[in-house]
Image (cartoon, rainbow, N blue to C red):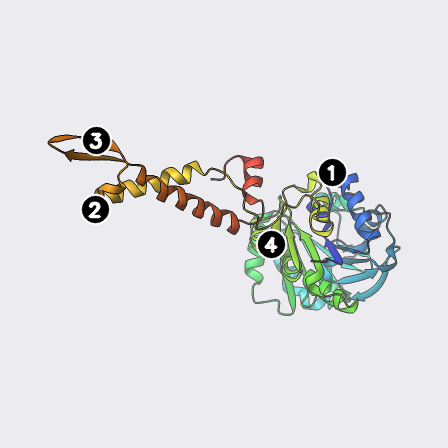
Amino acid sequence: MDYKMLFLDLDNTLLSSDMSISEENLRAIREASENGVKITICTGRGIFSVRHIAAQFGIDWDNCYIICLNGGAVYKGYPPELMEEKLFESKTALPIYEAAKKYGVDIQLYHNDRLIIEKITERIQNYIDKLNAEYIIIPDVFTYDGQISKILLNGPNDRLVKIQKELDGRIGGLNCFFSSENYLEFTAEEATKGKAMKALADRLGIDIAQTIAMGDSFNDMSMIETAGLGVAVRNAVQPLKDASDYITKNTNDQNAVAEVIDRYIFGRGKPAEAVYKFRIPVRIFIIILIIEQLLAFAFNFNQLKIVRYIYEYGAEGYSFGLLALPIPIVLCFVVDYFNQRTKREDEEEFWESKYGKRP
Protein backbone atom coordinates (compact mmCIF):
# COMPACT_ATOMS: atom_id res chain seq x y z
CA MET A 1 0.00 0.00 0.00
CA ASP A 2 1.24 3.48 -0.93
CA TYR A 3 0.55 5.49 2.23
CA LYS A 4 0.20 9.23 1.73
CA MET A 5 -0.79 10.56 5.15
CA LEU A 6 0.41 9.82 8.69
CA PHE A 7 -1.60 10.81 11.80
CA LEU A 8 0.41 10.83 15.04
CA ASP A 9 -0.82 11.02 18.60
CA LEU A 10 1.63 12.80 20.90
CA ASP A 11 1.65 11.66 24.53
CA ASN A 12 2.92 8.09 24.97
CA THR A 13 3.10 7.66 21.19
CA LEU A 14 5.43 10.12 19.47
CA LEU A 15 6.69 11.63 22.72
CA SER A 16 8.97 9.67 25.01
CA SER A 17 8.22 9.47 28.71
CA ASP A 18 10.38 12.55 29.31
CA MET A 19 8.23 14.50 26.78
CA SER A 20 11.02 14.62 24.18
CA ILE A 21 11.02 13.43 20.57
CA SER A 22 13.84 11.04 19.80
CA GLU A 23 16.25 11.85 17.00
CA GLU A 24 15.31 8.57 15.33
CA ASN A 25 11.62 9.53 15.24
CA LEU A 26 12.49 13.00 13.92
CA ARG A 27 14.70 11.45 11.23
CA ALA A 28 11.86 9.20 10.07
CA ILE A 29 9.26 11.99 10.10
CA ARG A 30 11.49 14.29 8.05
CA GLU A 31 12.28 11.54 5.55
CA ALA A 32 8.59 10.70 5.14
CA SER A 33 7.72 14.36 4.65
CA GLU A 34 10.48 14.81 2.08
CA ASN A 35 8.96 11.88 0.16
CA GLY A 36 5.53 13.51 -0.02
CA VAL A 37 3.81 11.97 3.02
CA LYS A 38 1.59 14.47 4.81
CA ILE A 39 2.44 14.52 8.53
CA THR A 40 -0.47 15.35 10.85
CA ILE A 41 -0.29 15.68 14.61
CA CYS A 42 -3.55 14.34 16.07
CA THR A 43 -3.81 15.01 19.79
CA GLY A 44 -6.14 15.79 22.66
CA ARG A 45 -3.93 18.73 23.64
CA GLY A 46 -4.77 22.33 22.92
CA ILE A 47 -2.68 24.13 20.32
CA PHE A 48 -0.92 26.09 23.08
CA SER A 49 0.91 22.92 24.11
CA VAL A 50 1.55 21.64 20.58
CA ARG A 51 3.37 24.56 18.96
CA HIS A 52 6.73 23.86 20.58
CA ILE A 53 6.47 20.20 19.58
CA ALA A 54 5.60 20.92 15.95
CA ALA A 55 8.46 23.41 15.79
CA GLN A 56 10.93 20.54 16.32
CA PHE A 57 9.84 18.62 13.22
CA GLY A 58 11.88 20.71 10.83
CA ILE A 59 9.64 19.78 7.87
CA ASP A 60 7.92 21.69 5.10
CA TRP A 61 4.61 22.57 6.77
CA ASP A 62 2.96 23.94 3.61
CA ASN A 63 0.82 20.83 3.29
CA CYS A 64 0.88 19.39 6.81
CA TYR A 65 -1.64 19.76 9.62
CA ILE A 66 -2.40 19.68 13.33
CA ILE A 67 -5.60 18.24 14.82
CA CYS A 68 -6.12 19.34 18.43
CA LEU A 69 -8.64 18.75 21.21
CA ASN A 70 -9.46 15.25 19.95
CA GLY A 71 -10.79 16.60 16.67
CA GLY A 72 -12.28 19.81 18.07
CA ALA A 73 -9.88 22.06 16.13
CA VAL A 74 -7.93 21.61 12.90
CA TYR A 75 -4.96 23.78 11.96
CA LYS A 76 -2.91 24.07 8.80
CA GLY A 77 0.85 24.44 8.72
CA TYR A 78 3.23 26.00 11.16
CA PRO A 79 2.79 28.53 12.62
CA PRO A 80 -0.68 26.94 12.90
CA GLU A 81 -3.59 28.59 11.13
CA LEU A 82 -7.06 27.61 12.35
CA MET A 83 -9.10 25.91 9.63
CA GLU A 84 -12.04 24.51 11.55
CA GLU A 85 -13.35 24.36 15.11
CA LYS A 86 -16.19 22.42 16.71
CA LEU A 87 -17.67 24.15 19.77
CA PHE A 88 -20.53 23.60 22.18
CA GLU A 89 -22.31 25.82 24.70
CA SER A 90 -21.07 25.74 28.28
CA LYS A 91 -24.63 25.59 29.61
CA THR A 92 -25.08 22.13 28.01
CA ALA A 93 -22.36 20.85 30.33
CA LEU A 94 -24.07 21.64 33.67
CA PRO A 95 -24.46 17.93 34.60
CA ILE A 96 -20.70 17.52 34.06
CA TYR A 97 -19.91 20.43 36.36
CA GLU A 98 -22.28 19.09 39.03
CA ALA A 99 -20.73 15.63 38.94
CA ALA A 100 -17.21 17.06 39.07
CA LYS A 101 -18.08 19.17 42.13
CA LYS A 102 -19.75 16.18 43.79
CA TYR A 103 -16.67 13.98 43.47
CA GLY A 104 -14.08 16.70 44.04
CA VAL A 105 -12.21 16.60 40.73
CA ASP A 106 -10.80 19.60 38.88
CA ILE A 107 -12.64 21.16 35.92
CA GLN A 108 -10.69 22.48 32.94
CA LEU A 109 -12.41 24.20 30.00
CA TYR A 110 -10.77 24.95 26.65
CA HIS A 111 -11.47 27.79 24.23
CA ASN A 112 -9.54 30.33 22.13
CA ASP A 113 -6.22 28.61 22.70
CA ARG A 114 -6.54 28.92 26.47
CA LEU A 115 -7.33 26.89 29.54
CA ILE A 116 -10.28 28.23 31.56
CA ILE A 117 -10.24 27.29 35.27
CA GLU A 118 -11.76 28.37 38.57
CA LYS A 119 -8.56 28.03 40.60
CA ILE A 120 -5.11 26.52 40.45
CA THR A 121 -4.94 23.28 42.38
CA GLU A 122 -1.89 21.04 42.65
CA ARG A 123 -3.23 18.81 39.86
CA ILE A 124 -3.93 21.74 37.57
CA GLN A 125 -0.53 23.30 38.30
CA ASN A 126 1.14 20.02 37.32
CA TYR A 127 -0.90 20.02 34.10
CA ILE A 128 0.05 23.63 33.32
CA ASP A 129 3.73 22.93 33.98
CA LYS A 130 3.70 19.75 31.90
CA LEU A 131 1.99 21.28 28.87
CA ASN A 132 3.14 24.89 29.18
CA ALA A 133 -0.55 25.88 29.08
CA GLU A 134 -1.84 29.43 28.97
CA TYR A 135 -4.87 29.97 31.21
CA ILE A 136 -7.43 32.39 32.56
CA ILE A 137 -9.25 32.16 35.90
CA ILE A 138 -13.02 32.67 36.16
CA PRO A 139 -15.14 32.89 39.37
CA ASP A 140 -17.44 29.96 38.67
CA VAL A 141 -17.88 27.52 35.75
CA PHE A 142 -21.64 27.44 36.39
CA THR A 143 -21.91 31.12 35.48
CA TYR A 144 -19.55 30.95 32.50
CA ASP A 145 -21.69 31.77 29.48
CA GLY A 146 -19.81 31.00 26.32
CA GLN A 147 -18.69 28.39 23.86
CA ILE A 148 -16.03 25.83 24.66
CA SER A 149 -14.19 23.23 22.62
CA LYS A 150 -13.39 20.70 25.35
CA ILE A 151 -13.92 19.89 29.02
CA LEU A 152 -11.30 17.91 30.90
CA LEU A 153 -11.96 16.51 34.38
CA ASN A 154 -8.67 16.02 36.19
CA GLY A 155 -8.60 13.68 39.16
CA PRO A 156 -8.22 10.15 40.58
CA ASN A 157 -9.28 7.39 38.23
CA ASP A 158 -11.80 5.77 40.60
CA ARG A 159 -13.72 9.04 40.92
CA LEU A 160 -13.65 9.68 37.19
CA VAL A 161 -15.01 6.20 36.49
CA LYS A 162 -17.94 6.94 38.84
CA ILE A 163 -18.58 10.24 37.06
CA GLN A 164 -18.56 8.55 33.66
CA LYS A 165 -21.10 5.97 34.82
CA GLU A 166 -23.26 8.61 36.50
CA LEU A 167 -23.36 10.79 33.37
CA ASP A 168 -24.12 7.93 31.00
CA GLY A 169 -27.22 8.92 29.03
CA ARG A 170 -27.40 12.41 30.57
CA ILE A 171 -25.10 14.31 28.20
CA GLY A 172 -26.54 13.86 24.74
CA GLY A 173 -24.62 15.59 21.98
CA LEU A 174 -21.23 15.20 23.67
CA ASN A 175 -18.48 12.60 23.46
CA CYS A 176 -17.09 11.21 26.72
CA PHE A 177 -13.82 9.27 26.92
CA PHE A 178 -10.61 8.77 28.88
CA SER A 179 -7.42 10.16 27.35
CA SER A 180 -5.45 8.81 30.32
CA GLU A 181 -6.45 7.20 33.58
CA ASN A 182 -6.59 10.62 35.28
CA TYR A 183 -8.22 12.62 32.46
CA LEU A 184 -11.90 12.25 31.55
CA GLU A 185 -12.72 14.39 28.52
CA PHE A 186 -15.83 15.74 26.81
CA THR A 187 -16.05 17.17 23.29
CA ALA A 188 -18.76 18.05 20.78
CA GLU A 189 -20.42 15.01 19.25
CA GLU A 190 -18.75 15.60 15.87
CA ALA A 191 -15.35 16.16 17.45
CA THR A 192 -13.43 12.88 17.39
CA LYS A 193 -9.98 12.14 16.05
CA GLY A 194 -11.43 9.68 13.56
CA LYS A 195 -13.99 12.09 12.10
CA ALA A 196 -11.44 14.90 11.91
CA MET A 197 -8.87 12.76 10.09
CA LYS A 198 -11.50 11.41 7.66
CA ALA A 199 -12.75 14.94 6.86
CA LEU A 200 -9.19 16.19 6.38
CA ALA A 201 -8.21 13.28 4.13
CA ASP A 202 -11.37 13.81 2.04
CA ARG A 203 -10.61 17.50 1.77
CA LEU A 204 -7.14 16.72 0.43
CA GLY A 205 -8.42 14.06 -1.97
CA ILE A 206 -6.64 11.22 -0.16
CA ASP A 207 -8.27 7.80 0.08
CA ILE A 208 -8.63 6.90 3.75
CA ALA A 209 -7.11 3.51 2.88
CA GLN A 210 -3.85 5.38 2.20
CA THR A 211 -3.59 6.72 5.76
CA ILE A 212 -1.78 5.47 8.86
CA ALA A 213 -2.83 6.44 12.39
CA MET A 214 -0.82 5.75 15.55
CA GLY A 215 -1.99 6.01 19.14
CA ASP A 216 -1.93 4.56 22.63
CA SER A 217 -5.15 5.35 24.51
CA PHE A 218 -8.95 5.26 24.41
CA ASN A 219 -9.29 8.65 22.69
CA ASP A 220 -7.26 7.21 19.78
CA MET A 221 -9.77 4.43 19.12
CA SER A 222 -11.77 6.32 16.48
CA MET A 223 -8.72 7.18 14.37
CA ILE A 224 -7.24 3.68 14.73
CA GLU A 225 -10.51 2.21 13.43
CA THR A 226 -10.83 4.83 10.66
CA ALA A 227 -7.32 4.73 9.20
CA GLY A 228 -6.25 2.42 6.42
CA LEU A 229 -3.63 1.11 8.83
CA GLY A 230 -4.44 1.50 12.53
CA VAL A 231 -1.36 1.14 14.73
CA ALA A 232 -1.19 0.71 18.50
CA VAL A 233 2.17 1.31 20.13
CA ARG A 234 3.50 -1.51 22.32
CA ASN A 235 2.60 0.46 25.50
CA ALA A 236 -1.00 1.11 24.41
CA VAL A 237 -4.07 0.10 26.41
CA GLN A 238 -5.27 -3.41 25.57
CA PRO A 239 -8.60 -2.41 23.90
CA LEU A 240 -6.65 -0.28 21.42
CA LYS A 241 -4.29 -3.16 20.68
CA ASP A 242 -7.28 -5.41 20.08
CA ALA A 243 -8.71 -2.93 17.55
CA SER A 244 -5.45 -2.21 15.72
CA ASP A 245 -4.08 -3.67 12.50
CA TYR A 246 -0.53 -3.67 13.82
CA ILE A 247 1.09 -3.46 17.25
CA THR A 248 4.58 -2.01 17.25
CA LYS A 249 7.49 -4.05 18.49
CA ASN A 250 8.76 -0.94 20.29
CA THR A 251 7.29 1.37 22.90
CA ASN A 252 7.10 5.16 22.74
CA ASP A 253 10.50 5.19 24.47
CA GLN A 254 11.99 2.99 21.76
CA ASN A 255 11.23 4.91 18.53
CA ALA A 256 7.87 3.28 17.74
CA VAL A 257 7.03 5.99 15.19
CA ALA A 258 10.26 5.41 13.28
CA GLU A 259 9.52 1.68 13.30
CA VAL A 260 6.18 2.21 11.56
CA ILE A 261 7.48 4.76 9.05
CA ASP A 262 10.42 2.57 8.09
CA ARG A 263 8.31 -0.56 7.87
CA TYR A 264 5.12 0.61 6.18
CA ILE A 265 6.13 3.72 4.25
CA PHE A 266 9.60 2.66 3.13
CA GLY A 267 9.28 -1.14 3.40
CA ARG A 268 12.42 -1.58 5.48
CA GLY A 269 12.86 -4.52 7.80
CA LYS A 270 9.61 -6.15 6.73
CA PRO A 271 9.97 -9.86 5.97
CA ALA A 272 8.61 -11.27 2.75
CA GLU A 273 5.06 -12.38 3.32
CA ALA A 274 3.67 -15.82 2.53
CA VAL A 275 7.14 -17.34 2.13
CA TYR A 276 7.52 -20.73 3.76
CA LYS A 277 10.60 -21.02 5.93
CA PHE A 278 11.83 -24.62 5.71
CA ARG A 279 12.60 -26.08 9.12
CA ILE A 280 12.40 -29.38 10.95
CA PRO A 281 9.30 -29.11 13.14
CA VAL A 282 10.39 -31.64 15.75
CA ARG A 283 7.61 -30.90 18.23
CA ILE A 284 4.90 -31.23 15.60
CA PHE A 285 6.45 -34.47 14.35
CA ILE A 286 6.53 -35.98 17.85
CA ILE A 287 2.91 -34.99 18.54
CA ILE A 288 1.66 -36.50 15.27
CA LEU A 289 3.73 -39.64 15.79
CA ILE A 290 2.26 -40.15 19.25
CA ILE A 291 -1.27 -39.67 17.90
CA GLU A 292 -0.55 -42.14 15.10
CA GLN A 293 0.76 -44.77 17.51
CA LEU A 294 -2.18 -44.38 19.87
CA LEU A 295 -4.58 -44.93 16.97
CA ALA A 296 -2.53 -47.84 15.64
CA PHE A 297 -2.64 -49.65 18.99
CA ALA A 298 -6.28 -48.73 19.63
CA PHE A 299 -7.43 -50.19 16.32
CA ASN A 300 -4.65 -52.78 16.02
CA PHE A 301 -3.17 -51.36 12.79
CA ASN A 302 -0.05 -53.49 13.04
CA GLN A 303 1.60 -52.04 9.93
CA LEU A 304 1.50 -48.53 11.43
CA LYS A 305 3.05 -49.48 14.74
CA ILE A 306 6.59 -48.21 15.08
CA VAL A 307 7.38 -51.14 17.38
CA ARG A 308 5.24 -54.15 16.57
CA TYR A 309 4.92 -57.71 17.75
CA ILE A 310 5.54 -60.43 15.15
CA TYR A 311 5.10 -64.21 15.19
CA GLU A 312 6.50 -66.15 12.24
CA TYR A 313 7.55 -69.76 11.72
CA GLY A 314 7.03 -70.66 15.35
CA ALA A 315 9.17 -67.75 16.62
CA GLU A 316 8.00 -64.52 18.21
CA GLY A 317 9.62 -61.13 18.72
CA TYR A 318 9.44 -57.39 18.00
CA SER A 319 10.47 -55.35 14.95
CA PHE A 320 10.82 -51.69 14.03
CA GLY A 321 8.29 -50.55 11.41
CA LEU A 322 9.61 -47.89 9.02
CA LEU A 323 6.15 -47.55 7.51
CA ALA A 324 5.09 -45.72 10.67
CA LEU A 325 7.39 -42.74 9.90
CA PRO A 326 6.37 -41.35 6.47
CA ILE A 327 2.85 -40.36 7.56
CA PRO A 328 3.87 -38.16 10.56
CA ILE A 329 6.80 -36.71 8.56
CA VAL A 330 4.52 -35.58 5.74
CA LEU A 331 1.77 -34.37 8.07
CA CYS A 332 4.14 -32.40 10.29
CA PHE A 333 5.39 -30.36 7.33
CA VAL A 334 1.83 -29.79 6.11
CA VAL A 335 0.79 -28.53 9.55
CA ASP A 336 3.89 -26.36 9.87
CA TYR A 337 3.36 -24.89 6.40
CA PHE A 338 -0.17 -23.74 7.19
CA ASN A 339 0.92 -22.56 10.61
CA GLN A 340 3.49 -20.25 9.02
CA ARG A 341 1.13 -19.07 6.29
CA THR A 342 -1.58 -18.07 8.75
CA LYS A 343 0.68 -16.23 11.20
CA ARG A 344 0.60 -12.44 11.18
CA GLU A 345 3.89 -11.62 9.49
CA ASP A 346 6.77 -12.17 11.93
CA GLU A 347 4.62 -12.40 15.04
CA GLU A 348 6.26 -15.52 16.42
CA GLU A 349 9.79 -14.21 15.97
CA PHE A 350 8.76 -10.97 17.67
CA TRP A 351 7.28 -12.67 20.72
CA GLU A 352 10.28 -14.97 21.06
CA SER A 353 12.82 -12.17 20.71
CA LYS A 354 10.97 -9.86 23.10
CA TYR A 355 9.49 -12.14 25.72
CA GLY A 356 10.73 -15.67 25.01
CA LYS A 357 8.30 -18.37 23.98
CA ARG A 358 4.76 -17.12 23.74
CA PRO A 359 2.49 -18.65 26.42
Residue 163: x and y, percent?
58, 56
Residue 267: x and y, percent?
70, 49
Precedes in sequence: disc 3 or disc 2 = 2
Q: Mark 4 belongs to which amino acid? A: Ser
SS of the residue at dot 2?
A: loop
Question: Which residue is found at the position 84% from the left and 45% from the top?
Answer: 56
Precedes in sequence: disc 2 or disc 4 = 4
The mark lying in front, picked from 1 and 3, is: 3
31 displayed left or right of 247: right
* Distance in Å between CA atoms under marks 1 and 2: 67 Å
Question: Which residue is found at the position 56% from the left and 40% from the top?
Answer: 349
* Distance in Å between CA atoms under marks 2 and 4: 48 Å
The disc at residue 327 is: none
The mark lying in front, picked from 2 and 4, is: 2
Disc 3 designates what residue? 318
Q: Quadrant of the N terminus?
A: bottom right
The mark lying in front, picked from 4 and 1, is: 4
The mark lying in front, picked from 3 and 4, is: 3
* Distance in Å between CA atoms under marks 1 and 3: 71 Å
Viewer-side residue, 122 vs 44: 44
* Distance in Å between CA atoms under marks 3 and 2: 18 Å
Disc 4 designates what residue? 244
Disc 2 designates what residue? 299
